[in-house]
Image (spheres, helix red, strand yellow):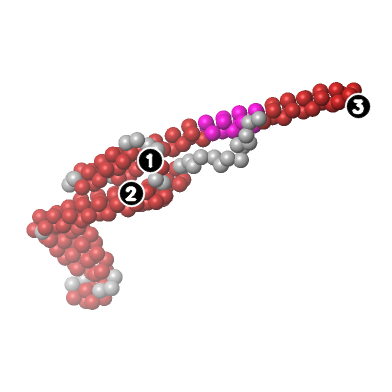
Amino acid sequence: MPQNKNNQKPPKTMTWVKALPVLIIALIFDALRCFFEMFWFFGPALAGAICTITVKGVLSTWTAGLFGAKTAALACGSGATIVGYFGAPVIGVFGVVMAIAVGLAGWLTIGFILMMTNARIFKENEGHALWFAFSLLISEVPIIGAVPGLTGITIKMYSTQIKKDKVLIKKWEKEQAELRRQERDQKIANLVQQRTAEPAQAEIY
């Protein structure tokens, strides 16, 4: 008689809903890395924006009395442009160094999360370790690092895992349906055998 395996738990499966938090974290690190890759542009622009907001906000009364808020804002923008022009080499190097640091931090963070919460993504899918290592290479190369490689490769890894898990769960469902059918057939056979045996036992007695 087949053993009752209908109580077996279904295999673990990954879904896009479960993967979403990890993908959001990867996207944040990619966005930060892109920001620092383009820091030669974003740095002076951000400094000018902060200066302008500060002038119009906290120091608006004081600046209005001396130069006027518009004049002070124009001075901030001009100052940021000058700093960006003359400080471009230093700003650029700082951005590259920060981009490399952020890329490494993001890669380690996502790797740690995957190992702690979804180690199957590496164990059950050949080549994923190499793909993940490739994402580090992308993030550490200047200019190319602006491409959201960590997010893209993480999506690819999850996509492969989710497709395989869908096949696995369908196989499990078919096996469970077959086991239920065998158990039902066995119960019917036992019942028929019991009904057949009852008249024979009655004749003996």
Q: Earlier in the sequence, mark 1 or mark 3?
A: 1
Residues at marks 3 and 2 touching, judged by CB atoms closer than 8 Å: no
Q: Which mark is residue 123?
A: 1
Pair 3/2: label in front: 3
Q: In this orientation, does residue 190 appear? A: yes
Q: Is residue 44 magenta?
A: no
Residue in the image at 36% along x and 41% along y = 122
Residue in the image at 66% along x and 30% along y = 1
Pair 1/2: label in front: 1
Q: Quarter of the image holding residue 98?
A: bottom left
- Nearest the viewer among 8 and 2 is 2
- Nearest the viewer among 160 and 78 is 160
- Kindly identify the amino acid type of the residue bearing the numbered disc 3: Tyr
Residue 104 at x, y = what percent?
A: 25, 52
- 196 on left or right of 98: right
Q: CA distance from mark 3 to mark 2?
A: 75 Å
- Nearest the viewer among 36 and 162 is 162
In the rendered image of this protein, does residue 175 appear above or below residue 27? above
Residue 56 at x, y = what percent?
A: 27, 69
Q: Which mark is residue 111?
A: 2
Q: Magenta residues, as a range?
A: 170-182
Q: Residues within 10 Å of mark 2 (few under 14, many from 20)?
A: some
- Kindly identify the amino acid type of the residue bearing the numbered disc 2: Gly
- 190 on left or right of 35: right
Total numbered labels: 3
Q: Which residue is mark 3?
A: 205
- 22 on left or right of 84: right
Q: Secondary structure at mark 2?
A: helix
- Kindly identify the amino acid type of the residue bearing the numbered disc 1: Lys
- Nearest the viewer among 143 and 135 is 135
